[in-house]
Amino acid sequence: MDSLPQLLLATAKITLPLSAIAFVLAILIGIISQVFRSNKFRPLAWLANVYVWLFRGTPLLVQLFLVFYGLPRVGITLDPWTSAIIALSLNTGAYVAETFRSAVASIPRGQFEAARTLNFTKMQTLRHVIIPQAVRIALPPLGNDLIDLIKGTSLVSTISLVDLFQSGKQVAAANFEPLAMYLEVAAIYLVIFTVLSWLQSLLEKRSNRYMRSVHA
């Protein structure tokens, strides 16, 4: 347990901030991608679809290597932190875009028609009808996307970032106790997962109460 402070420090300095920044960017990327995918201007829709297809269809590890080791070959050199944020946010953004697409697609067409009969503008329809329902539907998969992102940060050790996993590797190499070390690392990931799962459940309950109050 002497190594616990070092592991927690790596979690607080690298793993959690990296996950938070990448997830916020992924949400923005996902929203923009979904707007482009539903755009009637076909080149934009095509580009967004290719982006989602590419980043969902290739491993995160490959994407990290392309950003950190590949881009310098074309004159773009990035530090490990920036490379990790770019790769993680683009990877998760593709999944977030698909989450938003499926959430909007699951809303019955009658909701759009009802808004039209009430003379709602497109923005009013989005604000009062579509977005509240889509957010409620998207909350569980978005929570899963965040959890997957946090677990995916363990791969940034391959580009020399000393995150929670890399810190555990270093301690294991020093004390020759890999089993104990990796159990500690797993325990910290499990604690993060448990807290996030609890928060996700809380948000879903609040969202359901809000929707019931709106329709009451």
Image (cartoon, rainbow, N blue to C red):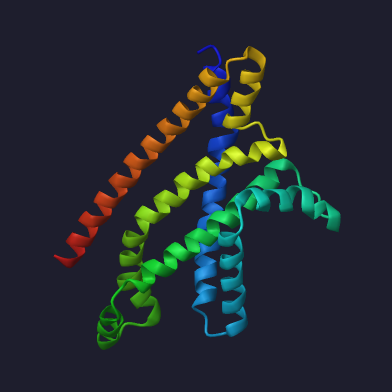
Which residue is at a point 35% across and 76% down the rendered structure image? 124
Q: Is residue 28 above or below residue 199?
A: below
Percent coordinates x, y for residue 111 in the rendering: 27, 78
Tell me what residue is drawn at x 38 percent, y 71 percent: 104
Measured along the vertical axis of the image, is residue 140 above or below residue 107? Answer: above
Nearest to the observer: residue 111 or residue 186: 186
Q: Nearer the viewer, residue 181 or 146?
A: 181
**Image coordinates for residue 150, horizontal then vertical, percent:** 51, 42
> In the picture provided, is 75 more to the left or to the right than 190?
right
Residue drawn at (36%, 82%) of the image: 121
Q: 136 left or right of 64? A: left
Pick the quarter of the image with the C terminus.
bottom left
Residue drawn 52% across the image and 50% down it: 23
The furthest residue to the left: 216
Locate residue 168, reporting x and y percent. Answer: 59, 24
> Residue 103 placed where, x, y %?
37, 67
Q: Is 45 located above or below residue 13 in the figure?
A: below
The reply, left or right, for residue 112 in relation to residue 78 is: left
